[in-house]
Image (spheres, rainbow, N blue to C red):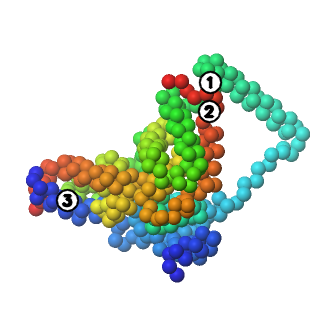
């Protein structure tokens, strides 16, 4: 195939691929239907969830105390066993193959350090090293989302929010604005993400390699 | 009212401004979601999720990039994550109805069209996304880079590789497309 063929192919490809997954000509964008769904989802998210923390009756209170105690003992035993076996505590993740569990933990630890670095300075996101770090983390985040580690709903939601933050950080690189004090990233969003990352990273000394 | 004013009002929680932003961008967002998903229900779901996320985070948007670029970045992120879930479901459970995903396209396509569609479907996700955004939806490499969090050079390289892969897969039909 020569250069002319390549050009002809590219031209044909652009024209022919216009029909790929194209909306049928008579199709309407379901604007109103989608708007109603969006409004409903936002209204549901805005409604505060009321959780009854105190059981209605004394016997329910006693049952709750026993259940809490049992959970506490269970967690204590698991933690103790982990510490004996590995020398440091790990979050229980029995469904996940060990390789993915280790990879996910290391990734979240690195992400926690990253968000902390970004959080510390409003100039940090434009730093070249931070940008490179964000790019590497984004690749790993997407790989994890595609792996069995992304199947856990809680971890998945965390990885998706991390992915969005990383894309936002990388968008700053292309920004032409001179107003570097104006940070695209919301501090509250970073704080929430940081809290969730910390909750997902096991306590104790780092894993030995 | 220009986009900046609209944005300021929407950030202050004005529902009329929010609706105006939605009306301005929803068609392109939906079309992009449809291109990526190939299915009307999924496109609807991705569009809704994208706008819900966008409105949730609107206060964080400072206008360093165009609002449309920011919205498309969210849409692509939502769609790719959604498609990962769908693919996993399809792979693991092999739901009968999942086989019909992407079947909104006409059945009466000639062989070449059908082969092209299949070849695009088989592209790796990154190549496919860049190819669809650039060659089909008309986004610039700068916009794609911003939306996907990749370098402009990477976007160009992925487009080049996507086209090369398609050329390779359709080589036996050279007579047909060069006619």
Q: Position of residue B73 (x, y in %)?
A: 45, 59
Say which chain tag 1 marks: A
Can I make out residue B5 in this image? yes
The span from disc 1 to disc 3 (Cα, nearest Å) is 57 Å
Dot 2 and dot 1 residues touching (CB under 8 Å): yes
Q: Position of residue A186 (x, y in %)?
A: 59, 57
Say which chain tag 2 marks: A
Disc sitting over residue A88 in the figure:
1
Q: Is residue A170 left or right of residue B115?
A: right
Residue drawn where x is 63% and y is 55% of the image: A188
Name the residue beneath numbered marker 2. Answer: A202
Q: Are marks 1 and 3 on the same chain?
A: yes
Residue drawn where x is 34% and y is 55% of the image: B152
Q: Position of residue A123 (x, y in %)?
A: 53, 54
Say which chain tag 3 marks: A
Q: Residues within 10 Å of mark 2 (few under 14, many from 20)?
A: some
Up/down of A165 relative to A141, above or below: below
Q: Nearer the viewer, residue A107 or B102?
A: A107
Name the residue beneath numbered marker 3. Answer: A10
Up/down of B114 relative to B64, above or below: above
Q: Disc 3 or 2, which lies upstream in sequence? A: 3
**Marker count (numbered):** 3
Q: Nearer the viewer, residue B97 or B153?
A: B153
Residue drawn where x is 52% and y is 32% of the image: A101
């Amino acid at each position: 195939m020569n250069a002319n063929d390549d050009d002809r192919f590219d031209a044909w490809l652009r024209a022919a691929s216009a029909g790929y997954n194209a909306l049928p000509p008579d199709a309407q964008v379901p604007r109103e239907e989608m708007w109603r769904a969006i409004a409903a989802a936002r209204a549901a998210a805005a409604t505060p969830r009321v959780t009854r923390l105190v059981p209605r009756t004394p016997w329910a209170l006693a049952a709750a105390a026993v259940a809490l105690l049992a959970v506490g003992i269970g967690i204590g035993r698991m933690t103790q066993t982990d510490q004996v076996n590995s020398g440091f505590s790990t979050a229980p993740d029995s469904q996940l193959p060990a390789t993915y569990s280790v990879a996910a933990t290391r990734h979240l630890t690195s992400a926690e350090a990253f968000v902390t670095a970004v959080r510390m300075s409003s100039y940090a996101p434009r730093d070249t090293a931070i940008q490179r770090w964000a790019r590497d983390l984004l690749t790993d985040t997407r790989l994890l989302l595609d792996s069995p580690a992304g199947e856990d709903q809680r971890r998945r939601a965390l990885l998706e929010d991390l992915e969005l933050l990383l894309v936002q950080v990388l968008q700053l690189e292309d920004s032409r604005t001179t107003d570097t004090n104006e940070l695209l990233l919301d501090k509250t969003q970073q704080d929430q993400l940081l809290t969730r990352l910390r909750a997902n990273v096991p306590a104790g000394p780092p894993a030995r390699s | 009212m220009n986009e900046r004013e609209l944005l300021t009002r929407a950030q202050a929680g004005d529902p009329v401004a929010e609706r105006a932003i939605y009306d301005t961008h929803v068609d392109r967002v939906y079309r992009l979601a449809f291109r990526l998903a190939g299915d009307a229900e999924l496109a609807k779901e991705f569009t809704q999720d994208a706008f819900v996320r966008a409105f949730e985070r609107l206060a964080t948007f400072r206008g360093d990039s165009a609002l449309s670029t920011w919205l498309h970045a969210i849409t692509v992120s939502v769609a790719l994550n959604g498609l990962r879930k769908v693919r996993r479901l399809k792979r693991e459970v092999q739901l009968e109805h999942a086989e019909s995903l992407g079947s909104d396209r006409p059945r009466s396509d000639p062989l070449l069209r059908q082969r092209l569609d299949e070849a695009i479907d088989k592209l790796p996700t990154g190549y496919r996304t860049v190819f669809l955004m650039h060659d089909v939806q008309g986004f610039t490499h700068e916009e794609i880079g911003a939306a996907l969090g990749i370098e402009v050079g990477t976007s160009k390289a992925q487009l080049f590789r996507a086209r090369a892969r398609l050329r390779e897969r359709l080589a036996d039909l050279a007579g047909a497309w060069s006619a």
